[in-house]
Structure formats: structure tokens, C-alpha cells
Image (cartoon, rainbow, N blue to C red):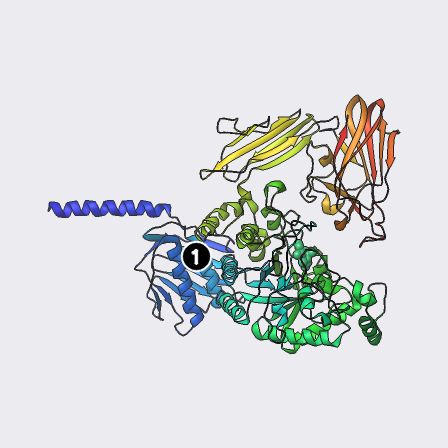
Amino acid sequence: DRRKIIRAIFLTLICTLGLSVNAQTKVDYRVVPLPHQIFDEAGKRLTINEKSPIINMEPENSMMRRNAEFLAEYIEDHSGIKMAVKSGNKKKGVILLKLGLENENPEAYKIEVNNKALVISGASEAGVFYGIQTLRKAIPVKPTSAIEFPAVTIKDEPRFSYRGMMLDVGRHIFSVDEVKTYIDMLALHNINNFHWHLTEDQGWRIEIKEYPKLTEMGSQRKETVIGRNSDRYDGKPYGGFYTQEEIREIVDYATKRYINVIPEIDMPGHMLGALASYPELGCTGGPYEVRTKWGIAYEVLCVGNDQALEFVKNVLNEVMDLFPSEFIHIGGDECPKTRWEKCPKCQARIEELGLKDDEAHTAEEKLQSYFISYAEKVINERGRRMIGWDEILEGGLAPNATVMSWRGMSGGVEAAKMGHDVVMTPNSHVYFDHYQSTDNARDPLAIGGYSPVERVYALEPVPDELTNEERKHILGAQANLWTEYIPVFEHAQFMVLPRMAALCEVQWMQPEQKNYEDFLSRLMPLIEIYKINDYNYAKHIFDINAEIVPNPKDETIDIYLDALNNGDIYYTLNGTAPVKHSPVYDEVIKIDENAQIKAVTFFDGEKSRVFSEDITFNKATTKPIEALQPVDEGYRFEGISTLVDGLSGNSNYRTGRWIAFRGNDLEAVIDLKKETTIKEAGLTSYVLKGDWIFDMRSFTVQVSDDGKNFETVARKEYEQLGQSDSNGIKKHTLRFDPTEARYVKIIAETEKEMPGWHSGAGKPGYLFVDEIIIN
Ligand code: NAG
């Protein structure tokens, strides 16, 4: 009858509408990190809705029960669909979670979807959890009443067993809830080790019952320096710590998410929090105060003092009571030996142990090694393993130590060659306190450095130079978040997201499967998950990406632009703000006179940051240039042509705008391509003495008309830098009588031996240079 027909039409309508809604909420298994194998299966999709339960097939297993609850929570967060969680061993139900996957890797999992069920099986509970993470990330963030899963088989397992992320709570502390959120962020990225840096010069943050003053006094500093160790202080007391109860709560929270918490008690340097509380533990006996500025302090633990060793033993034992972690981190970084050299107790200990300077190590370095081995014994006695920063190699490595390589990868290589385990966390790639863009003026103040998402992604933790046997010692990789310049949690999130997404592909995926472009496309849905969780993330990846290259053939500076969304890019060349009726970029922009390029794109209705760059021409710009002595390998970037690319570097020397010379000199010849009248030549350098970057010692300009015989037209020598000479950008310009030249040679001598007052005394300094100016 008519009513039936109308109802039928109505139902069909609803269904089609429903389907079209669902068609938009497309499940995509290509998530971050990309699963190892995804086999698209022929066959019908599986539809789930609120009537489809999640069934835990291991009813006796509380971890599995919790896994099922996590999945239900995630599905509700993404879609609004509330699914019941049931236990049972009956093969009924739509999503089934089970153990028993046969795989040597305990974190392996498999997902199988056909039109009857979705089964996640794991080699362990953790494996099931990672399957759940993959499934969660595959489900789009969009309210809906049903989700359709294409038939598939996914087989996945991580490359590395150690996938870490560090958080420094010494410089700035974060609340228990914030730390839990950090742990949630780690779980989303399949990270399984949370390295918790709990003690510092600027604050001791963990309650130790036997030493109450550590938190009464050591957790409080009277004020904090403003900016990068300016002479000004904020006058505001700052402090805080975690009670043992809170620590237990956090460890439990992490354990439920298959994250091991590695506590770090940083020793014997970075310990002013402890020394301020118990001055008898230092070489001079104090008084000490909790440090109010950043950097390295001379005051360290007195290793000649038995009481100090007793302290270390007791603290480590209480720490091991709180943290079930196999690895216990003892720090070991940046411990100056100044006090030990003068301290009678330390010298007596050196004597007693018969430690002597030799070619490789000083007696004080060996004293450090003695101390670290002592800590290791305390840790090993409880069946745990010690891990420390790569300085623990100095003076000889403790017998069972694992090394966390932060000053590049060389410490890790050395340790692996000695048969020790290693975690790679090089500050060249994964120091998340470093800048994420070259446009430092528009980013929040950071410690320095430059590690954009792409550089993080490029990290390969296993160095080529290792043999197959040595490679097995590379347990994995970690990124660190030091928080000197990160006072609040939203800022911490901004520093780690989305760099953590790039990190997790380094940690999880096989290197041959990694692909940065592909990663960026898969990152978008992950960012939707950041959004629903209110995670503050950095948006630099949406910025315009520019490649600016000098083209000596056409004598132009060529600009190539692209943006993540492949959307239109609008630009101007005269410094005015680009708008939607500005020219649209469609092919390389060729610049042959001074210009200020600005460009913008639009993304999801949002405007990207305005890209802006000044290009300034002089007679050397775009001209062929040849280096007669090599550029330093570590700071080569695009090489010598950087000096004639029309761009100038800012106060961040790692962006690729500066190149460096070390050990040899800058010696380069520029071909002006025709006889040209010139009367001045200039070169810009960048000085940062603390980072071993010195200025040039002489600057010479020579000219030639055949490129073979050069004649000096100007030369200037410079004094060695003194301790109080300023850092920063230095312009060196030499003027001379107008002369005709086809070729110009620029020679800048580097500092061959850094002065006596410097920590690198006697070693060669870096010379960082940028634009050559010839007029
Ligand atoms: C290093 C210090 C650390 C500091 C960080 C800043 C290590 C192992 N030590 O100098 O205390 O916060 O760099 O990037 O990284």
C-alpha cells in the first residue's frame, strides 16, 4: 500500500543520505607511523555502529580489558559512536581483540578486516595496543553514526625496541595532568619510553623521603633569568616537585599505555638543586643556591666525599622503589672538573685509586668514570641497567653502561664499537628545544639551533660505519625537550608537535619505507586528532617552502615555491602584503635586481604565515664562485654559492644561511664574468664564542684578469678575540682605489688556536661567514 511505499522511499533516502555521510568519513589505514604491510583485500566492507561491541577475547587479562576500553574511547572521540565493551571467548562481535599472534617481536600486531569482523591480534598486550593506535588513527575525526572499514590485512611491528621521548621538568615543572597528557601524546605516536629528567641545577623535582630538604629547599629557586642569560631577573620565586604518590600515579598511567618511565637523576654535574639542600655534598661546602640562570655550573658533587656516595646510593634506591624501569638514567652530562682539580678530598680519592693523567683521559675524567661505575653498581645490584649521556665515555665507560648519544652520533658509535648498547638522540636532529623555522624573529624565543620537521624525519639512527654486529647495539632513538625557554605546557606541545610525528616514523618504520612527501600527506589526519585533543601544535609545515638558488648562467636568483596543500601561492616582489589578487606563482621566479619577496597561501580557510625574504644584489651576486679550500662538513649546507645568493643570515647559525670553515681558511674566487670596476669588498661573519665560533684573523682581497695571477688590493689583520669581545654579526669591509677586475679572490683566515681563557683552548675555532659584497 501507499504508506508502505512512502516508508520504503523514505528509508532508502535516509540510507543513501547516511551512506553519503559515511562515504566522506573514509577510513584510511595509511597512518603515522605507516604500518609495515597493508594488503587491500577484495571483498565487502565492514560497517560498525553503536550496536557493534568490542570483544576482548582474553577475559582474564586486565591489560586486554583496558585495551578494549581505550579503543571504545577513541572511537567515541572520533565519531561519537559509543560501543559496548564485552569480554568473552565466543567468536561473536564485530571488533575482536586477542593475543597469540606468532611473531618474535613482542610489539607486533595484525589487523584483519572482512565483512564480518575486525580482528586485532597481538604478540603481546602491547602489540594489541599498537594495533588499536593504528585503527584509531585510521578512523577520521568526524561525527557519524556508522563507520565503514575496507577489507584489509595489516601486518606491523616496530623497527626499534627503544622509542623514547624526554621531558625536562627541572627548568620548568609541569602539573601531573600535563605530564599525563604528554604521556597520551607519546602513546598516540607509538612511543614506549618516557625519559623523565627530574633533577637539575634549577630545581630538584622528586620527593626523596630520606632527604626531605631536596624538595623543601632544592625544588625552589628565588627567581629566573630573563631571556638568554641576560643580567636581568624576573624577581619571582619558582618551584615545585612531585610527591612519591604523584610519581606512582604517573608511572601507573604510563604503564597502562605500555610506556616505561625512565627516571633521570642527573649526576655529578647539574646538581645545584641537591647541593643547595645539602651543601656538605659539594667540594667547597657552599653555601649554594638553586641556580637562577641557564648553562653549566662549576659547582658539582664532591666525589671524594663518602657522604656524597652514600647520598647517591640512598637516592637511587628510593628511585628504584618508585620506578620499575629496567633502565635508570644517571645523567652524567656537562660536569666541569674545575672543583675536583682543587678539592683535597677529590684529590685524595684520585691518589687512593691511583688515577693518573694519560694520553686519553685526565685523572679527573677517570674520577668521573669511577663515580659513574659506583652508581652503576648500585643500580646493577637491584638487577637494573644504567644509562647515561655520552660524557660517561670520558675516563672510560662503566662495564654495563648504555650510552645516550646527544652530542651528535659519535659517542654512540664509539660505545657500540665497544659492545655497549646505545640510544641515539643527536642534537643535530632531535633536540625539540631548537627552532623549527629560519624565521626566528617570529617564533617564540628558543635556545637556538634549527631542527624543522624535515630534518627530524631525516635522522637515521644506525650509522653506516657500524658492522652488523655493532648495529644490534643501537636500541633506538629518542628526542629531548629541554625546557629552559619553555615555561608553560602549551608551549611544550608546540615544540614537540608535529616533530614527534616525524620522530615516530624514524623509530617505527623500516628506513626504505620512509618518504617525507608521503609522510606529510599522512600527517593531515593526525593533526585532526591533535585538534580534538586540544594539543597545541606548531604550524610551520603549512608555511611556504622556498628554495632560493643563484643561477650563474642567467645571472639571476631563482625562487621556487611550494606549499603543502598544493594550493595557489600569491606573491609580491616589492614588499607589499600579498593578497588574493596578487600574482599566482606558477613557475620559477627569476630575480635580477633588489627585491623583497612576500608570499602566502591559504589552507582550510586559514592563511599561512607570510613568507618574506630580502634579496640584495651586489657585483658578486649570482656570479660563479669556487672554493679553493674546503667548507666544514658539518656546516656545508648548499656550499660556497651561499656567499653569492643575495640572502643574508640572521643570528641563528644553523639555518643554512651561514657556512663554516674550520682548521683551514676561506679562500674563494669569484668570476665577475667581465672586466668590472670595483672599489670595495666585504664579508659578514658571525661570532658566538661559547659555541667555538670565532672571527677571522685576517681578510685579504686580490684581483686578477686571468684567474691565475692575483694581486692584493687590500688586506687587514684582526686581533684574537678576547673574553669580553662581543658576539654577533660582524661586517668586514675593505675599501681600495677603484680597479678593474675580472676575478676577485677573497681570503679570510680562521682562528687556528682558540685562546687560553676558552674551554676549547688550543683547538681550532669555527669561522661562520655569509654574503660576499663586491662593489
Ligand atoms: C645541553 C644540556 C642540557 C641543556 C640542553 C639544551 C644535554 C645532555 N645537556 O647543553 O642540560 O638543557 O643542552 O639544548 O643535552
Amino acid residing under circle 1: Leu
Q: Position of residue 411 (x, y in %)?
A: 72, 60
**Label 1 within 8 A of ligand 1 by Cβ:** no
Is residue 307 toward the left or the right of residue 221 in the image? right
Q: Residues within 10 Å of mark 1 (few under 14, many from 20)?
A: many
Residue 291 drawn in magenta: yes
Q: Give above or below for 502 relative to 584.
A: below
Q: Secondary structure at mark 1?
A: helix
* Ligand 1 image-quadrant field: bottom right
Residue that sits furthest to the front in the current view: 235
Residue 415 drawn in magenta: no
Q: Visible in this render: residue 438?
A: no
Work out whether residue 515 or residue 83 is closer to the camera in this orientation and state it: 83
- For disc 1, the marked residue is 135
Work out whether residue 563 or residue 624 is closer to the camera in this orientation and state it: 563
Q: Quadrant of residue 655?
A: top right
Q: Give above or below for 708 relative to 604.
A: above
Q: Position of residue 93 (x, y in %)?
A: 33, 64
Work out whether residue 631 or residue 235 is closer to the camera in this orientation and state it: 235
Q: Position of residue 572 (x, y in %)?
A: 56, 27
Stretch of the chain drawn in magenta: 288-292
Q: Quadrant of residue 161?
A: bottom right
Residue that sits furthest to the left in the current view: 1
Q: Main secondary structure of the magenta part?
A: loop
Q: Position of residue 382 (x, y in %)?
A: 63, 77
